[in-house]
Amino acid sequence: MRNFLILSIILFLSNLVSGQHDDNARNDGIQEIVERIELPTIPEFSVSVLDFGAKGDSLANNKEAFDKAMSAIKKNGGGTIIVPKGVYTINGPIHFVSNVNLKLETGARLKFGSNPKDYPLVLTSWEGTMLYNYSPMIYGIDLENIAITGKGTIDGEAKDSWANWKELQEEDQLLSREMNHKGVPVKERIFGEGHFLRPQLIQFVNSENILIEDITIEDSPFWCLHLLKCNSATLRSLKYDAHNYNNDGIDLEYSRDVLIENVKFDNGDDNLAIKAGRDHEGRSNSDQASQNIVMRNCLLKGLHGVVIGSEMSAGVKNIFVDNCKAWGDLKRGIYFKTNPDRGGYMKDIYISNIELGRVEDLFFITANYHGEGEGFNSKISDIFINNVSSEEATGTAIVIEGYKDSKVEDVKLTNINVKKANNAITIKNTENVTFEGVIIGEEAGVPTTATKEEVTKF
């Protein structure tokens, strides 16, 4: 009895020390990333769009006024463009320059037009393939020190226009993938007129020191906020009301050193999707893995909460998600998806202190997304999930699926509580998956003593 007591104490202390070590490592990793991120430096100079003829009456086309304001800022070397209260129709994109803050004051709404001819072709990425397509509503490339702030709203006005292209996109979608696989030069991947790939609402490319804060995002044609090949970004206190097809809230692609915090998601697809290029092209950019990303203190509502993939061929690593809570139903809470077209890897993922309500699946890793592809299995390893709860999983609480020749490895789930689940766990083709304190359904207590009738029956 004495030896058993000593062993119990040793095991308890060992688990306690291990848990503290995991917490310290996670907190140190988060702090290191956050301290490295730089906020944009914006000169004191400012202008109002009203000074350039803008009218917030929802009727006038304010494209020229916003272009003139941006030119004035560029001539000065930077500054703030102030957008006062009002509804500003803009038939065409806003193209950013460096060292500028677009400040939308309370009650300001940017309402973008839906005529494709108003949106010139720009270098972008569509589902992980670089190409030229219609400009996003707000766009910038090769910039530094850029910000969108204030309590205003950016409205893509897409539900009765761009959103309808979803049904028309398949031919162009397949063409872009073919160009990727065949290595067609990017300069020859021309879409736009006669094609039906929807543009993003907000996109910055190859830019650094970015702040997007406080704004509300609505009615996007495609992905809402897309950072492509960006470095050092803070996305803070955003709000969403975007429910069209593929209205991902935040997409990070080939990007690093990003802080996402205090965001209230309510969008029609993934809340956060971390990506890194697709297939042949993504694998050729293995030095541009998406990495060093922190998401914390966010409210989740949409299709999926936290997603990695499926376009992740350059790799995804060093990801921290902490202290987030659902304020509505989700299809999947935590979702990692790839297939044998992708290659690449997912590793060093730390997810902790997540509180979800009703989901279909709480935690889902699949190396067979859409059941397609061959020849380029992805490597998934070093995943740490701690202190996650859900009220109900109508599908399966935990799913981890690798391949026989490319197993999912080194996954640790600690303190997972699902109060009710249709199915508990599916695990296939894995190695070194560990569970500590995982409860699915009602927690088992002290075993009951067999009754006389049961003894007789058995």
Image (cartoon, rainbow, N blue to C red):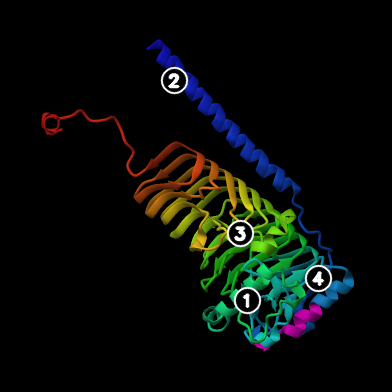
Q: Nearer the viewer, mark 4 or mark 2?
A: 2
The CA span between labels 2 and 1 is: 61 Å
Q: Position of residue 341 (x, y in %)?
A: 59, 61
Q: Position of residue 93 (x, y in %)?
A: 71, 79
Q: Nearer the viewer, mark 4 or mark 3?
A: 3
Say whether marks 2 and 1 touch (CB < 8 Å).
no
**What residue span does the magenta drawing correspond to?**
59-69
Which residue position is annotated with label 2?
8
Which residue position is annotated with label 3?
342
Which residue position is annotated with label 4?
97
The CA span between labels 4 and 1 is: 32 Å
Q: What secondary structure predominates along the stretch shown in magenta? A: helix
Q: Residue at point 45% right, 52% down?
A: 362
- Tell me if I can see residue 213 in this picture: no
Q: Dot 2, crowdedness within 10 Å: few (<14), some or many (≥20)?
A: few
Q: Nearer the viewer, mark 3 or mark 2?
A: 3
Q: Nearer the viewer, mark 2 or mark 1?
A: 1
The CA span between labels 4 and 2 is: 63 Å
Sequence-wise first label, 4 or 1: 4
Relative depth, front residue between 422 and 239: 422
- Residue 68 within the magenta-colored segment of the rendering: yes
Query: Which amino acid type is shown beneath numbered disc 2?
Result: Ser
The CA span between labels 4 and 3 is: 34 Å
The CA span between labels 3 and 1 is: 17 Å
Question: In the figure, residue 137 lies in which quadrant?
Answer: bottom right
Query: Which amino acid type is shown beneath numbered disc 3?
Result: Arg
Q: Residue at point 61% right, 59% down?
A: 342
Q: Dot 4, crowdedness within 10 Å: few (<14), some or many (≥20)?
A: many
Which residue position is annotated with label 1?
175
